[in-house]
Image (tube, helix red, strand yellow):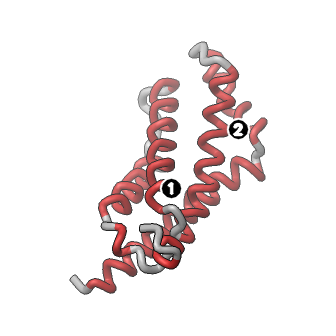
């Protein structure tokens, strides 16, 4: 495979993934706003005796990581760290949803998981179109 194709594919997958997470976090932080996000899950959390402070921490963590991680992926800045944080975000979300509703719809989470895994499998030296490369942060 042409080396430039791998670099271009890495950029396209990373930019797409960054945009998806960026707007997911943006929506939770600035449109719905955190009280709305917390209220959305409050009934399920109460039903399963999940403490309100834990629900609040998880809601803030996932929203901030998705927003900031999405921006960082889009620009290729601290890409590996962003991928690890977003991977952990997906684990937390999957655990929470699975705990509250074991047969939940994974159509939104699983594609993001595949994108994160794909980006983690592409060697860092293929991140030429990124701030990591510009600042030699590989």
Left or right: 23 in relation to 95: right
Placement of 40 over or under 131, stated as above or below: above
Check disc 1 and report its element: helix, strand or loop. helix
Left or right: 27 in relation to 90: right
**Quarter of the image that includes the N terminus:** bottom left
Q: Position of residue 119 (x, y in %)?
A: 38, 62
Residue under label 2, please give it: 37
Q: Position of residue 103 (x, y in %)?
A: 42, 31
Residue under label 1, please give it: 82
Query: Pointers 1 and 2 in contact (CB under 8 A)?
Result: no
Q: Residues within 10 Å of mark 2 (few under 14, many from 20)?
A: some
- Distance from Cα at disc 1 to Cα at disc 2: 23 Å
Which residue is painted at 59% across and 42% down in the image?
62
Residue 21 picture quarter: bottom right
Q: Residue furthest left?
A: 1
Nearer the observer: mark 1 or 2; the answer is 1
Left or right: 9 in relation to 47: left
Closer to us: 84 or 118: 84
Q: Residues within 10 Å of mark 1 (few under 14, many from 20)?
A: many
**Quarter of the image that includes the C terminus:** bottom left
Check disc 2 and report its element: helix, strand or loop. helix
Q: Position of residue 22 (x, y in %)?
A: 61, 59
Q: Position of residue 106 (x, y in %)?
A: 44, 43
Earlier-in-chain disc, 1 versus 2: 2
Q: Residue furthest front?
A: 136
Placement of 105 over or under 80, stated as above or below: above
* Residue 17's disc number: none
Residue 70 picture quarter: bottom right
Which residue is painted at 50% across and 68% down in the image?
16
Which residue is painted at 62% across and 22% down in the image?
45
Looking at the rendered structure, the number of numbered marks drawn on it comes to 2
Which residue is painted at 65% across and 31% down in the image?
57
């Amino acid at each position: 495979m042409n080396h430039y194709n791998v670099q271009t594919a890495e950029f396209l997958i990373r930019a797409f993934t960054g945009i998806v997470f960026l707007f997911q976090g943006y929506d939770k932080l600035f449109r719905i706003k955190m009280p709305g996000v917390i209220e959305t899950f409050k009934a399920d959390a109460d039903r399963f005796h999940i403490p309100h402070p834990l629900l609040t921490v998880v809601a803030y963590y996932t929203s901030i990581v998705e927003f900031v991680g999405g921006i960082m992926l889009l620009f290729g800045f601290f890409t590996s760290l962003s991928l690890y944080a977003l991977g952990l975000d997906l684990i937390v979300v999957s655990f929470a949803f699975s705990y509250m509703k074991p047969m939940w719809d994974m159509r939104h989470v699983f594609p993001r998981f595949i994108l994160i895994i794909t980006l983690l499998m592409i060697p860092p030296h293929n991140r030429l179109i990124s701030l990591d490369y510009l600042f030699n942060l590989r």
